[in-house]
Image (spheres, helix red, strand yellow):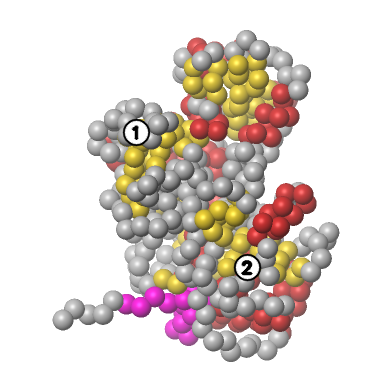
């Protein structure tokens, strides 16, 4: 007779159990932009989350409620999230610095029971001051609750259209059951994970709370800073870190990067955007091919593929393969395309028979009759089933009848050592339909590379029709802390009276 399957444990109960096992073990280190790092034990997290749970309960939060957490990366963000889960509520982390009009649209779609944040123009909101004021309150005893759903993520994508992605997954897991592309088993003392991403983004939010569930130590940055990332890796002997390509580029450009100590790392995970080949090779050389893990997935959780640097060297440019996710490449008529042919990417987890998410505020995405879903990305498969990403369909530029993918042009430009960031967009053009336009953030705005030097740099790397017809230098590209750009806004700002220069 086989042993019974282990029962899942609620997110809130797991925090209590860990606090009971080793109350004085450090679970969270918060690294602010200025000032000393702050450490919190498992007992601290349990106490503070229970105190804040009492406050949320007094404001009407019950099992099934939605709680918006609109705070910057902070201990209070973590405590509030766990507090909401202890009450069985769904947590929607929201970018704290959203313009009021965009924030209010998302709140209207979400219809939360309670909003936590420091927005002075909003009423009926719990501020961070009120959260901190609970630290001397009595610690309540709560019944165990499972949130269903547990998490919602806000997304405006490339188009700026607000939507909320809601996962139907309950707020519970089996202890020791690891998720994602990395085997998280570690030494008896546990892993240390560095989180440089914002908590309103899937990467930052999930990595933080899954690591706490696993009993690992989390080093949470208030805001990404490339130099500080390396300092924290060395100081805390970090084992795991997840970064988007923009972050990886900024770390790679540090002047002393080759002399820094990365020996504690067991995995550097990349996700969230296209990863230029030259930058992949740089990180393979820096940390070793086995320790660089690339993956492709989405907040919708329709599937994931991954590979390490060693596999990537055998399949350069690929984002991976998986035994647990099926991938199809379909043309506009929904017909499967052969290996090497570009089409729309559809994915399905092998054990999923129902949708893994729903949208609030937006129509559902394309879904085949047998359950494969597309989030709008284009790519192809090779003969071995490895997936390659071209770009998002909505970002593709059609110039003179030719399809041009911004990611390819951006990767070429980012090889220039004087460029720290770039966004390539298609602007309206009476002759070409769209023309390729590059918005560049140079290392030194006062001494930016010349237009001719940039054109020559591109000509050496990409075919002539993909070379930008216009180059524009800005002091800083308007990326979010998660590395996201609203490309439609960039296009709109430049479409009125835009000229080549």
Is residue 10 inside the magenta stretch?
yes
Residue at image coords 51%, 83%: 144
Closer mark to the observer between disc 2 and disc 1: 1
Q: Position of residue 307 (x, y in %)?
A: 33, 45
Quadrant holding the C terminus: top right
Residue at 65%, 41% in the rendered image: 160
Q: Which residue is the extreme one toward the top?
A: 431
468 in relation to 357, above or below: above
SS for callout 2? strand
Can the viewer see residue 251? no
- In the rendered image, residue 330, in percent from the top left (x then y), is placed at 37, 34
Structural crowding at the residue carrying mark 1, measured as other residues with C-alpha within 10 Å and reported as few (<14), some (14–19) or many (≥20):
few
Q: Nearer the viewer, residue 193 or 469?
A: 469
**Which of the two residues, 367 or 2, is positioned nearer the viewer here?**
367
Seen from the viewer's position, the closer of residues 77 and 449 is 77
Residue 85, located in which quarter of the rendered image?
bottom right
Which quadrant: the N terminus? bottom left
Which residues lie in the magenta part? 6-25
Q: How many marks?
A: 2
Residue at image mark 1: 335
Left or right: residue 462 versus residue 448 is left
Q: Residue 488 in magenta?
A: no
Q: Is residue 461 in view?
A: yes
Residue 246 percent across, percent down from the top left:
55, 40
The residue that mark 2 highlights is 66
């Amino acid at each position: 007779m086989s042993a019974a399957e282990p029962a899942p444990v609620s997110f809130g109960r797991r925090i209590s159990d860990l606090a009971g096992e080793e109350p004085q073990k450090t679970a969270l280190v918060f690294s602010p932009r200025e000032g000393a790092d702050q450490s919190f034990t498992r007992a601290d997290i349990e106490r503070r989350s229970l105190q804040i749970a009492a406050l949320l309960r007094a404001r009407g939060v019950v099992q099934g409620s939605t709680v918006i957490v609109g705070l910057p990366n902070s201990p209070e963000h973590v405590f509030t999230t766990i507090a909401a889960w202890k009450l069985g509520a769904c947590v929607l982390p929201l970018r704290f610095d959203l313009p009021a009009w965009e924030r209010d649209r998302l709140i209207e779609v979400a219809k939360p029971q309670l909003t936590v944040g420091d927005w002075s123009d909003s009423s009926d909101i719990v501020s961070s001051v009120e959260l901190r004021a609970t630290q001397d309150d009595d610690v309540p005893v709560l019944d165990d609750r499972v949130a269903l759903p547990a998490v919602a993520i806000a997304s405006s994508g490339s188009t700026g259209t607000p939507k909320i992605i809601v996962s139907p997954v309950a707020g519970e897991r089996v202890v020791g059951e690891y998720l994602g592309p990395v085997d998280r088993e570690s030494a008896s003392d546990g892993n240390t994970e560095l989180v440089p991403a914002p908590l309103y983004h899937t990467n930052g939010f999930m990595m933080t709370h899954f690591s706490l569930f696993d009993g690992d130590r989390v080093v949470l940055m208030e805001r990404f800073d490339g130099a500080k990332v390396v300092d924290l890796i060395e100081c805390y002997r970090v084992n795991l870190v997840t970064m988007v390509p923009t972050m990886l580029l900024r770390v790679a450009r540090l002047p002393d990067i080759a002399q820094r100590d990365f020996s504690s790392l067991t995995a550097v995970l990349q996700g969230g955007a296209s990863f230029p080949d030259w930058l992949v090779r740089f990180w393979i050389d820096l940390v070793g091919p086995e320790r660089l893990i690339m993956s492709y997935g989405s907040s919708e959780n329709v599937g994931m593929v991954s590979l390490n640097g060693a596999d990537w060297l055998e399949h350069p440019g690929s984002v991976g393969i998986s035994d647990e996710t099926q991938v199809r490449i379909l043309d506009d008529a929904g017909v499967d395309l052969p290996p090497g042919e570009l089409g729309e990417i559809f994915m399905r987890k092998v054990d999923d028979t129902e949708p893994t998410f729903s949208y609030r505020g937006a129509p559902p995405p394309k879904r085949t009759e047998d359950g494969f879903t597309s989030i709008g990305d284009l790519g192809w498969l090779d003969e071995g089933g490895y997936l390659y990403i071209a770009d998002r369909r909505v970002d593709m530029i059609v110039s003179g009848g030719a399809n041009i993918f911004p990611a390819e042009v951006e990767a070429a430009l980012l090889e220039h050592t004087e460029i720290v960031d770039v966004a390539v967009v298609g602007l309206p053009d009476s002759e070409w339909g769209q023309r390729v336009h590059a918005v560049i953030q140079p290392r030194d705005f006062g001494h930016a590379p010349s237009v001719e030097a940039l054109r020559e740099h591109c000509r050496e790397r990409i075919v002539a029709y993909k070379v930008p017809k216009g180059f524009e230098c800005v002091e800083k590209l308007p990326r979010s802390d998660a590395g996201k750009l609203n490309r439609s806004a960039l296009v709109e700002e430049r479409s009125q009276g835009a000229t080549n220069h």
